[in-house]
Image (cartoon, rainbow, N blue to C red):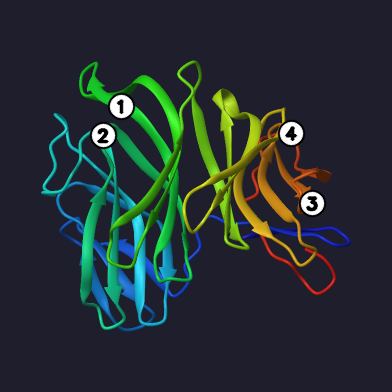
Amino acid sequence: MKWIKTKHIIVMFVLALFAVVSCKKDDDGSKKLSFGSGLNMKLGKSQKEFAVSVLKGTDYVYVVGNTEADYGMKSDFSDYNGGYYDVYINKISLDGTILWEKCFGDKDSEKAVEAFPTPDGGLIVIGTSSDLNYANGGLAHLVGSADVFAWKIDANGTVKWKTELADNGEDEYVHSGVVKDDELYMFYSKSFNRDLTCRRVGVSDGTVKNEKLIYDKYSRINRVKSDSEGGFLLVGSISNDAGIIKLSGSLDILWTKTYGGSSGDVAYDIEETNDGY
């Protein structure tokens, strides 16, 4: 881990982050989930599954990720929806009982990027949907446009609402987001990581409140966090340097800062401290 510190800013460059729950592969290739120092369990089937978010509730854990179909779009999951990827979620009790295991998506390829807990015990998943198919000797390729989505899923695994952004003329890719004051702030960009935009969505019903262009130059955001001043911190890559964008509560840019040398640098996370960030 490499630390860069200014007067008020500490940015963490991380290779991997393991908290209460971690995942690893077993000898037979299946995934194994580890709760602290005790319980280990396998998740997934013969396809490739990988986690993007782990959400811990009072007596359960959500493991949110993606499952990848094999050549020919075949999957061992009976509820696989088609395409190259489906969103794959497990809800697990703290004693290791799988409460439910489900695939989410439709005929396109849906890939989760991040997930957030909701007060009712459910979760919100954001990601990118695209029409990926196999061709050219078994390689997956994009044959249509890429769009961003957000889904609200309740504690029983039922999708309560969906919101999608589709622009047939251009691709959109979700970067990260944050839930604040019963609203989802979802940050995405268009092709080549330009035109960073925020979409505000009501958590309770999926109503799109508004969209706002944030930054019109190259940026790739890896993490969004709200801060104690009522605004937001966005960290990632800006013009091939590790970068931070500080936003007000109304999503106006207050300042941007970059760090790095002659090669490409990327920031992955940021934490607030007693005297700054």
Alpha carbon distance from label 4 to label 1 = 35 Å
Query: For the residue carrying disc 1, how many other residues have a C-alpha within 10 Å: few (<14), some (14-19), or many (20+)?
Result: many
User: Depth check: 92 or 258 in front?
Assistant: 92
Mark 1 or mark 2: whose residue is earlier in sequence: 2
Residue matched to label 1: 132
Looking at the figure, which quarter contains the C terminus?
A: bottom right
Residue 158's place in the image compared with 47, above or below, is: below
| Residue that badge 3 annotates | 248
Q: Secondary structure at mark 1?
A: strand
Is residue 143 left or right of 237 when viewed as pictured? left
For the point 62% across and 43% down, which residue is it? 221
Of callouts 4 and 1, which one flags the residue occurring earlier in the amino acid sequence?
A: 1
Q: Which mark sits nearer the N-terminus, 4 or 2? A: 2
Residue lying farthest right? 7
Query: Pointer 4: what residue?
Result: 262
> Do the residues under discs 1 and 2 have CB atoms within 8 angstroms?
yes
